[in-house]
Image (cartoon, rainbow, N blue to C red):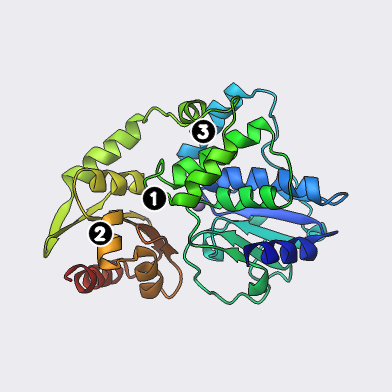
Amino acid sequence: MLYSKFKKLINFIKNKNLLILTHDLADIDGFVSTLTLKLFLNQVLKNQKIYITFSELSSNSKDFKKNFSKKFPDFGYFCDENIDFSSVEVILIIDTNNLDLVKSPTNFDIQKSDIPIIFIDHHLNLDKKYKNNDIALNLIYEDFSSTAELIFELFEYFKVDIPNTYRFLLAAGILTDSGFFKYANNNTISRISKILTDKATLQDKITLLERRTNVSEKIAKIKGLQRVRLIRIGERLVGISNVSSFSASVATMLINIGFDVSIVYSQEKDDFRITTRAKKEVCQKTGLHLGKILSEISKGKGGGHDGAASVSGKENLDIYLGEIINKLKQTLII
Ligand SMILES: [Mn+2]
């Protein structure tokens, strides 16, 4: 199934000019998957343009890029500045299947354009029907712990060599999205073992991902902790808090200190964002799937994985929070 879809995708994009985009505030998986997919396509599809660009990188990705550039000063190429949209024939969207999360450069409206789009992703399939998306061409596999692994499978299947630098990129995507293997499955381990070489060891890669937490993130975590409200549902503990930024790292911190589920929201002018996390063990025992809950309550705007999901919106923050708690009560009580 996977391989027949690979062939179908390559056949469709052959001889077409491509643009590869990932979600806004690209995390490390989105960032490295975009770069490595471009390398792969350059090897298998000759004589066509393949553009990549990013709206903005997350702070983790920026730190990683800095470390990576220090280790590989000759790498040099990260993104195309000037993209001629009139020449783009297919847009590949990486690491999300929700166009609301994608900001295109120069405010080009992807949803309104007629350029075909294809999703390559590992999040819950929201099954949104976009007029310029043929779902048969999408590669959306929730059982992959990172998009980087899907890109790695492309290299494997088409027998394309992966240069050492790109092995570092792929491994960084896998390590971060699998929570350093906490959310990994057997396939994740087998793929990473094929990516590692004597020249690119696991420890080398972990070092590249080390980062010093900056002071504003530390303050966000402390405030997030001061403001947390505890809701007990049976034997499970749910924590709700709010911060103005770094909601994802605050949500993860709440899980690390003992909450089973964390909900952290941020508000900026008219916009809000809710980030949720849950312990893997809780998801497995209770069937909790935060991605499904957020997708349901927002009619497909939000989504993610069973243990990590988020949603953004403009109004109804309180209603969303109330509905999340209600759904948690129904799920966690068993
Ligand atoms: Mn990802």
Which tag is nearer the camera, tag 2 or tag 3?
A: 2
- Earlier in the chain: of badge 1 and badge 2, it is 1
- Earlier in the chain: of badge 3 and badge 1, it is 3
Image point 23% across, 68% down: which residue? 328
Image point 58% across, 40% down: which residue? 194
Is label 3 in a helix, a strand or a loop?
helix
Is label 1 in a helix, a strand or a loop?
loop
- Residue 288 in the image: state x and y as whole percent: 30, 66
- Earlier in the chain: of badge 2 and badge 3, it is 3
Q: Which residue is mark 1?
A: 183
Amino acid at the residue labelled 2: Val
Is residue 232 left or right of 267 when viewed as pictured? left
Q: Quadrant of residue 212?
A: top left
> Does any atom of ligand 1 lie closer than 8 Å to the CB of label 1?
no
Q: CA distance from mark 2 to mark 3?
A: 31 Å
The relative height of residue 68 versus residue 316 in the rendered view (above or below) is above
- Residue 14 in the image: state x and y as whole percent: 82, 60
Q: Which residue is mark 3?
A: 64
Image point 34% across, 34% down: which residue? 216
- Residue 45 in the image: state x and y as whole percent: 82, 52
Callout 1 touching callout 2 (CB < 8 Å):
no
Q: In front here: 160 or 179?
A: 160
Q: In front here: 304 or 228?
A: 304
Q: Quadrant of residue 261?
A: bottom left
Q: Which residue is mark 2?
A: 282
Q: Is any atom of residue 272 visible in this view?
A: no
Amino acid at the residue labelled 3: Phe
